[in-house]
Amino acid sequence: MSQPGSIAVGPRYFAALLLLIAGLQQFFSGLTAVAHDNYYAIINNYVFSFNIATWGWIHLTLGVLLAVSGVAVLAGASWARYVGAVIAAVSAVTLFAWLPYNPVGATIMIALDVFIIWALLASHQRASN
């Protein structure tokens, strides 16, 4: 089995780093929501109006999953690219529902999640060619 060239390895490491960054951001956002539930704005009459602490636990869980998949991508696990892409997609949908609570942060993280999905799947195509 041959080692992938630097063209294939570079995007994989970049995607793994983005997964770690997104995971840490989600984790600390969730930790903030759980520890200080009055930090974020309370939205009434919103379709996805969970308790802020519930949103915090959702973000904590997604953050850990994103970071673990980032570490697995760094370790070279081929399954981790697909798992990371799926978790990033779930994260993007969750952040869309989180938009009223943190509009700027959620928009930036949605863009990062979309870029993570692209980086993971594009690096996999280059590695298999």
Image: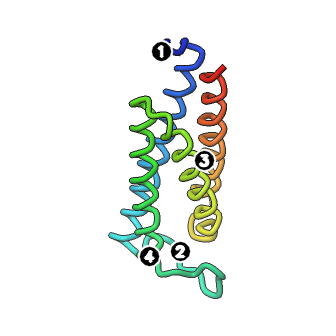
Task: Please state which of the two labelled residues, at mark 2 or mark 1, is closer to the viewer.
Answer: 1
Residue placed most toward the observer, 33 or 38: 33
- Residue type beneath disc 2: Ala
| Other residues around mark 4 within 10 Å, as few (<14) / some (14–19) / many (≥20) | some
What residue is pinned by disc 3? 113
What residue is pinned by disc 2? 41
Task: Please state which of the two labelled residues, at mark 2 or mark 4, is closer to the viewer.
Answer: 4
| Other residues around mark 2 within 10 Å, as few (<14) / some (14–19) / many (≥20) | few
Give the left or right position of residue 36, taking residue 109 as reference. Answer: left
**Rendered location of residue 4, percent (x, y):** 53, 15
- Examine the rendered structure and indicate whether residue 33 appears above or below residue 124: below
Q: Are marks 2 and 4 in contact (CB under 8 Å)?
A: no
**Rendered location of residue 61, percent (x, y):** 41, 61
Nearer-N-terminus badge (4/1):
1
Secondary structure at badge 4 equals helix
Alpha carbon separation for disc pair 3 and 4: 21 Å
Q: Quadrant of the C terminus?
A: top right
- Residue type beneath disc 4: Thr
Nearer-N-terminus badge (2/4):
2
Secondary structure at badge 3 equals helix
What residue is pinned by disc 1? 1
What residue is at 65 percent from the left and 87 percent from the top?
Answer: 45
